[in-house]
Image: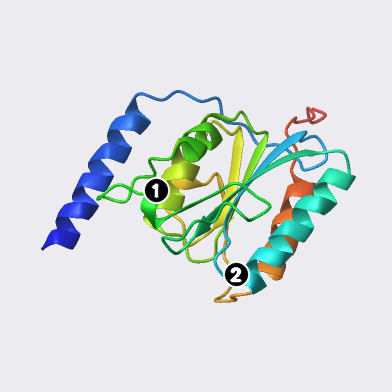
């Protein structure tokens, strides 16, 4: 009973905030993107390390990168090398309430990579309300959270997900050439 109430309050809050929001969305290739946001579940080391390695790779190629990780605990996670939030930073109905998440949502990313293969409501909330021009995530994410959704055929490998996302983003075209008549 309480779970359904929490979910209804979550959906109501998300719809209300989404209704008042106007962000310009546009597809963008990885090559043209200059500022990339990465939202990920950093709880497990085997998922965290490939994401951090990919962020370093993007920085080496001249991109500005901002990370936000979710840690599925209630401990103090300030010792991690990336901004993060945890269950203590969620309201009773799953909405993130930390200052870190609020700032991340407001960042004008060219591309937001929602690198969570099992998206939770709070991760979808952040991606949905993000000021990013183009949002990429898993097909398991909420439909309003992503502009491009990748179905990984039940693969749980974050490295494969990153590879697929990068492959599609390299092929994106944001301008169309006129066809000859």
Q: Crowding at label 1, few (<14), some or many (≥20) Cα neighbours within 10 Å? A: some
Quarter of image, res 37: top right
Q: Which mark is residue 89?
A: 1
Seen from the viewer's position, the closer of residues 96 and 157 is: 96
x, y percent for residue 72: 46, 64
Tell me if residue 130 comes above or below residue 56 in the rendering: above
Give the side of residue 125 with respect to residue 44, left or right.
left
- Left or right of residue 160: residue 122: left
- The number of callouts visible is 2
Q: Residue at x 61, y 38 (%)?
A: 134
Crowding at dot 2, Cα within 10 Å, few <14 / some 14-19 / many 20+, comes out as: some
Label 2 secondary element: loop
Q: Is residue 63 above or below residue 137?
A: above
Q: Does any portion of residue 164 appear in the rendered image? A: no
Q: Please name the residue shown 62% across and 32% down the image.
A: 26
Q: Quadrant of the C terminus?
A: top right
Q: Is residue 37 left or right of residue 127?
A: right
**Residue nearest the observer in this picture, 80 or 181:** 80
Indicate the quadrant containing the N terminus: top left, top right, bottom left or bottom right: bottom left
Please name the residue that numbered disc 2 is placed on.
152
The kind of secondary structure element at disc 1 is: helix
Of all residues, the one furthest to the right in this rendering is 61
Residue 180 % position (x, y)? 83, 29
Residue, x 73% and y 48% (percent of image)?
169
In the rendered image, residue 80, in percent from the top left (x then y), is placed at 64, 56
Q: Are marks 2 and 1 in contact (CB under 8 Å)?
A: no
Q: Which disc number belongs to residue 65?
A: none
Distance in Å between CA atoms under marks 2 and 1 = 30 Å
Mark closest to the chain's N terminus, 2 or 1 = 1
Give the x, y percent position of residue 69. 57, 53
Q: State which mark lies toward you, 2 or 1.
A: 1
Work out whether 46 lies above or below 62. Answer: below
């Amino acid at each position: 009973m309480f779970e359904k109430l929490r979910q209804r309050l979550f959906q109501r809050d998300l719809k209300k905030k989404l209704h008042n929001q106007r962000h310009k969305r546009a597809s963008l290739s990885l090559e043209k993107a200059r500022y990339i946001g990465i939202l990920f579940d950093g709880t497990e080391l085997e998922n965290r390390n490939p994401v951090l390695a990919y962020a370093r790779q993007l920085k080496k190629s001249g991109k500005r990168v901002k990370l936000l990780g979710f840690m599925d605990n209630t401990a103090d996670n300030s010792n991690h090398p990336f901004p993060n939030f945890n269950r203590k930073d969620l309201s009773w109905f799953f909405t993130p309430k930390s200052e870190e998440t609020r700032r991340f949502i407001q960042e004008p990313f060219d591309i937001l990579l929602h690198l969570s293969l099992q998206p939770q409501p709070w991760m979808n909330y952040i991606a949905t309300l993000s000021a990013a021009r183009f949002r990429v995530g898993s097909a398991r994410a909420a439909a309003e959270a992503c502009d491009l959704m990748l179905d990984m055929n039940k693969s749980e490998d974050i490295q494969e997900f990153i590879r697929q996302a990068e492959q599609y983003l390299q092929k994106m075209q944001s301008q169309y050439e006129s066809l000859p008549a």
